[in-house]
Amino acid sequence: MLFFFFVFSFIVIISSLSVVFSSNPVHSVLFLIFTFFNTAVIFLLFNAEFLAMTLIIVYVGAVAVLFLFVVMMLNINDSLMKEGFLKYFPFGLLLICIFFGELYMIFESNVFITPSDIRISISELVDGGMDNTKSIGLFLYTDYFIVFQISGFLLLLAMIGAIVLAHNEKINTRYNSPIDQKILNKKDVIKLN
Amino acid sequence: MIIIPEIFLSIGFLLILFITPFIKINAHVKVGYFTLLIIFLTQFFVLKDIFLFEEIFNGFFVIDSFGSFLKSIILISAGLVIYFYLIIKNEKSLLRPEFSLVILISIIGMMLMVSANNLLSLFLSMELQSLALYILVSFSREDINSSEAGVKYFVIGSLSTCIFLFGSSLIYGLVGSTDFSNISQFMSDQYSIPIMLIVGLIFILVSLSLKISAAPFHMWTPDVYQGAPTIVTTFLSTAPKVAVFAVLIRLLVFPFGEIIVDWGKIVIILSISSMIIGSLGALKQTDLKRLMAYSTINHIGFIMMGLVPGSEDGITAISIYLIFYLTMNLGAFLVILNMQRDQINVTSIKDLSGLYKNEPILAACFAVILFSMAGIPPLAGFIGKLLILNIVIDNNLFFLAIIAVLTSVIAAFYYIRLVKSIFFDPPVHDLDNFSNSQSKFLLSILSLFNLTVILYPQFFLNLCASITLSLFALK
């Protein structure tokens, strides 16, 4: 188990470094997808199969494919992007230091509560023989039912909004409406002799 | 029992959505009247449960008199906006049935916001209402300003969402729950409040200030108000403000009531800067909608002062001020909506000049509303300002009261400048006639309300006091 964890973590690190350093943007996106898959495997090793599934469905299925399309359409010139790398390097290094410092402080301090204090403990449920997906579903459709419904409304609104903002009713297309043809009177028609 | 008004509104929304594609002729008018009917019926459900107190859906929402009262105000103002939409000549791109539908779904979001009792449900309902508002702002597709305003509003709104989420994640990390009652339990158990919790609260306050356009988070307001179609601006400046104020009151006074010393200072700074920017920024504006945006910022600053003591009287004063603010704003925007030349809505201040010559009664009504906004006695705006100032002075915040009075005097200048241009300037270009009698009727009712409130202020005072009493009873 630990052996597999190290193997897959190693692959994740290598492939995410390749995302940053590969010269072709399309390769970067493909490496990103590879990273997602390996991360999903790591989740699976720790019995978090729901996270693994959502990672593959949402990130690989939707987000990364979208990235791929955008990268293909934009035709990015990477020599331009690498310009000024040295100029920004010290600033980047500073940001990395700050970020790692913050991470260290969070892990050292005990300001934030530990997972055992949380009201709903998924791990207890999992130990009791329920799997991850089932217990999330149980909470989502009972305790969190109303929140789930509101998110449904949010998605419906997003759909209506997309249609309102993008749908264009064209008036001068050459479409013949069957209803108009049927209710046409004889005297309205131009007669060609 | 449970949230019947919201459920009724949602089912009504889905029904109208279902029948909309089958209405061929004049769909926007018919859908608009259906929406009005649904809102009218919902009002009964809201008022029926006004004395109820109940926590529902595992504490995700709470039903109380305060919430029901603000819901009813939101419904009235949104209903009036839809009625304005129906009686006024709109530009062609607005004449689509989806307009009233999107307003309806945003009302659902606001009503859920008012009764939210959990950071999670609050977040989702706030998103529901703001997503609807982004769509409304960019509704007029032919107009490039509307799209620009839509993009600006969307970017700023997403930023505010991110900040809100960050703040609530910090609070969740410390407390272990997003429920308001658990948060307040955590506060009372603690000897010293962890600094991270205050940071989280500040993030949430910043996000709400962005939504309510309190300075220094106001920068989107003038652009969005100007670019959006005028009917949308009317909606934007009325109902959402009430909803966000309800959230502010519920959030600050209850779960975070223990740390009033910390957020009190922030609210004081927000209100001072809003009043100053709202009064000084409007001085040089030439567009009425931009001017109204700054006037809104000024009013928001004034209302926020009532929050500072976190007491019952303060919230009573806020509720009363909100009612008067809605009547004034709806009246002023009704005039702006009717300012049309060759069927096109014009919003420059110059276009107002000489209105008195053409439409004396209308000009008088508008003047009453403008004077009320400036806070000139004995109009409604004066009573609102008086109540809030009274609260502020009772709590020995004299510097705040002095700034408030000074900025009100500055703000009075630009309202009175409008009145001067209506009555004394020679007409430059003639506007189209204010042909529709419904808007004249509504405008005269609104201005009459502003005029006569002085005769029965006790009614509003008692009403709002009893409403707020229910809010504090559960504490």
Image: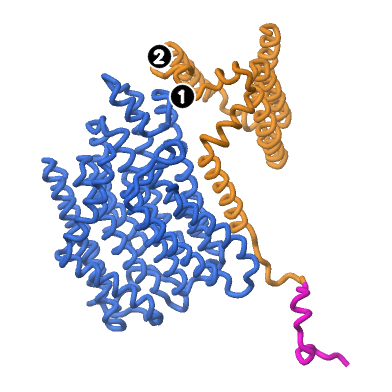
Chain colours: A orange, B blue
Quadrant into which the C terminus of chain B falls: top left
Instruction: Confirm whether residue A70 shows in the render.
Output: yes
**Subunit that carries the residue with mark 1:** A
Would you place residue B39 above or below residue A92 in this image?
below
Would you place residue B406 above or below residue B350 in this image?
above
Q: What is the three-letter code of the residue carrying label 1? A: Arg
Name the spot of residue B120 as percent of width and height, x first.
46, 36
Name the spot of residue A135 as percent of width and height, x first.
60, 27
Residue B199 in the figure: left or right of residue A6: left
Q: Which residues are magenta?
A: A176-193
Looking at the rendered image, the disc whose residue lies closer to the viewer, 2 or 1, is 1
Residue B448 in the figure: left or right of residue B197: left
Query: Between B160 and B444, which is closer to the camera in this rendering?
Result: B444
Q: Name, please, the residue furthest toward the right.
A: A193
Query: Between B89 and B191, which is closer to the camera in this rendering?
Result: B191
Query: Which quadrant holds residue A14?
Result: top right
Residue occupying image coordinates x 32% and y 33%: B255
Query: Between A83 and B306, which is closer to the camera in this rendering?
Result: B306
Instruction: Confirm whether residue A102 shows in the render.
Output: no
User: Which residue is disc 1 drawn over?
Assistant: A119
Residue occupying image coordinates x 36% and y 66%: B333
Residue occupying image coordinates x 15% and y 52%: B405
